[in-house]
Image (cartoon, helix red, strand yellow):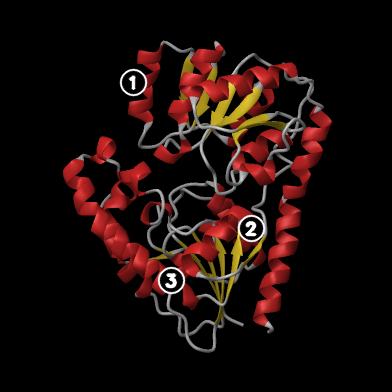
C-alpha cells in the first residue's frame, strides 16, 4: 500500500509538527508533501522523509510572508499528483485536507482546526488596528472566497479526526461532517517533574506570539496581580507586545524561543502557566501539567477538555485582565496536588495517541 502524508507547511516544531513526527515514525516509507519547507527546521524523523514541496517553495522567504500568499494555497495544494497512492493522511489546519486524491484512495484528515482566519477569527488576524482599513477591505473578500473553497473541498476527506471536541464541533459547523476525537500527543516522559528544581514566584506563557493567543491580556493581568510574567515564544506580535510591556510597567520578560530543555525548566519553575486565549486544544497547558504545574486558563475551547478546575488549575470565565488577576489570586489559595496534576496529563501521552490514531487509520484503510 502506497501512503502519502500531507502537511500544510514545515517551518518549525510546534504542536502540529509533533503529530506529524509520530506519523513519520509510524510510516517511515511514506512520502511527505507540504506547501513549503525550511530545511532543518523540523525533527530528523520528518526531515528523513525528504518533504516534497509545492510551487510556493520557489518564492524567496515565503515562510516569512506566507499569510500574503493565502490566495495561492488552493492552486498550490491541488497541483500535487496523488495518482500513485492508496492512502492519504493529511494533518491540516489550513489547506492540506484539500488535496485531490484518486477514486480508489482513502483519505483520513487529522484536523487541527478549520482555518481560523477564513472563518471566525478574521478580525483577530486582520482587524483594522492590525493591518489598516485598506488592507482589511481588500482581504475580506479574499478570505471569504478561501472559506467557500475550504467548505467546498470538505468532501475530499473520507474520515475526519479532530484534536478536541471543540474542533469536532467546528468541523460540524463549517464542513457539515462528523469527526472522531483523538487528542494530540504530549511527551510526558520528557515533560516531567523534578523535585530538585525550586519553584519561583512567576507566571509563565509558552506560546506563538500571534493575535488570538491574547497575550496582551496576560501582561495586564500580571500587572494587576502584581506577579512577574515570563513569556516563551516568538512571532509577529513580539514588537507590539514589547511596547505594551514598556507602557504597562509590568514585570514581564519576553524570553523568545527556547530549546525544549529550556521550556521544560521554565514549566518546572513556574508557579502557574497562563492560557488567556481560546485554544482549539492547547499543547502547552498539558506539557505544564505533565511537569506538575497548574494552569490558569480561559474557560473556553480546548481548555475545558484539558484543565480540571480546582484540581489541575483554574478556569477563568472572561478574557479580561481583571478576571485573570482574580484567577491568579484563586490559584494562589489552592494547595494543588502536583502528583494529581501529573496523573491527569498522562491521558494525553504519546503512546495513547499513537495507539488510537493507528487503529483509526487501519480501520479506514481496510474498510
Left or right of 130? Residue 104 is: right
Q: Is residue 164 visible?
A: no
Query: Disc 1 to disc 2, how far (Cα)?
Result: 39 Å
Residue 306 falls in which quadrant of the image? top right
Q: CA distance from mark 1 to mark 3?
A: 39 Å
Q: Residue at x 73, y 38 (%)?
A: 308
Q: Which residue is mark 1?
A: 243
Q: Earlier in the sequence, mark 1 or mark 3?
A: 3
Instruction: Choose mark 2 or mark 3, whichever is in front.
Output: 3
Closer to the camera in the image, 64 or 250: 250
Instruction: Mark 3: give few (<14), some (14-19) or many (20+) Cα within 10 Å.
Output: many
Residue 300: image location, x then y, percent: 58, 42
On the question of residue 175 being in view, the answer is: yes
Disc nearest the viewer among 1 and 2: 1
- In the rendered image, which residue does mark 2 sit on? 22
Mark 2 element type? helix
N-terminal-most mark, 1 or 2: 2
Relative vertical location of residue 205 with respect to residue 350 in this rendering, above or below? above
Q: Residue at x 50, y 50 (%)?
A: 42
Residue 115 located left or right of residue 269: left
Q: Position of residue 80 (x, y in %)?
A: 39, 75
Q: Earlier in the sequence, mark 2 or mark 3?
A: 2
Q: Residue furthest left?
A: 134
Q: Nearer the viewer, residue 176 or 52?
A: 176
Report crowding for label 1: few under 14, some 14 to 19, many 20 or more residues within 10 A (C-alpha).
Answer: few
Q: Residue furthest front?
A: 317
Q: Is the N terminus in the top left, top right, bottom left or bottom right quadrant?
A: bottom right
In the rendered image, the vertical position of residue 249 relative to residue 319, given as above or below:
above
Amino acid at each position: 500500500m502506497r501512503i502519502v502524508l500531507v502537511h500544510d507547511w514545515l517551518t518549525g516544531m510546534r504542536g502540529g509538527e509533533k503529530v506529524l513526527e509520530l506519523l513519520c515514525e509510524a510510516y517511515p516509507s511514506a512520502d511527505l508533501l507540504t506547501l513549503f519547507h525550511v530545511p532543518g527546521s523540523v525533527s530528523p524523523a520528518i526531515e528523513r522523509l525528504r518533504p516534497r514541496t509545492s510551487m510556493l517553495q520557489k518564492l524567496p522567504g515565503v515562510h516569512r510572508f506566507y499569510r500574503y500568499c493565502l490566495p495561492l494555497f488552493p492552486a498550490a495544494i491541488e497541483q500535487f499528483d496523488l495518482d500513485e497512492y492508496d492512502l492519504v493522511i493529511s494533518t491540516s489546519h489550513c489547506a492540506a485536507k484539500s488535496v485531490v486524491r484518486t477514486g480508489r484512495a482513502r483519505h483520513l484528515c487529522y484536523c487541527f482546526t478549520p482555518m481560523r482566519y477564513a472563518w471566525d477569527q478574521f478580525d483577530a488576524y486582520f482587524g483594522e488596528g492590525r493591518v489598516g482599513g485598506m488592507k482589511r477591505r481588500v482581504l475580506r473578500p479574499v478570505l471569504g472566497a478561501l472559506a467557500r473553497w475550504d467548505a467546498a473541498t470538505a468532501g475530499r476527506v473520507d474520515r475526519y479526526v479532530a484534536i478536541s471536541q471543540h474542533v469536532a464541533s467546528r468541523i460540524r459547523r463549517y464542513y457539515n461532517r462528523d469527526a472522531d476525537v483523538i487528542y494530540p500527543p504530549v511527551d510526558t516522559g520528557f515533560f516531567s517533574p523534578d523535585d530538585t528544581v525550586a519553584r519561583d514566584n512567576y507566571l509563565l506563557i509558552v506560546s506563538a506570539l500571534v493575535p488570538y493567543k491574547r497575550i496582551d491580556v496576560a501582561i495586564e493581568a500580571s500587572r494587576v496581580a502584581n506577579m512577574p510574567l515570563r513569556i516563551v515564544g516568538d512571532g509577529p506580535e513580539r514588537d507590539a507586545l514589547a511596547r505594551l510591556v514598556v507602557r504597562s510597567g509590568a514585570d514581564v520578560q519576553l524570553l523568545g524561543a527556547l530549546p525544549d530543555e529550556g521550556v521544560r525548566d521554565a514549566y518546572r519553575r513556574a508557579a502557574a502557566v497562563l492560557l488567556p486565549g481560546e485554544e482549539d486544544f492547547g499543547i502547552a497547558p498539558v506539557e505544564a501539567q505533565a511537569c506538575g504545574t497548574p494552569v490558569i486558563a480561559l474557560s473556553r475551547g480546548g481548555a475545558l477538555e484539558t484543565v480540571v478546575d480546582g484540581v489541575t488549575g483554574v478556569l477563568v470565565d472572561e478574557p479580561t485582565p481583571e478576571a485573570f488577576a482574580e484567577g491568579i489570586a484563586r490559584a494562589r489559595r489552592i494547595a494543588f496536588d502536583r502528583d494529581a496534576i501529573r496523573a491527569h496529563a498522562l491521558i494525553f501521552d504519546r503512546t495513547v495517541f499513537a495507539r488510537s490514531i493507528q487503529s483509526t487509520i487501519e480501520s479506514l484503510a481496510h474498510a
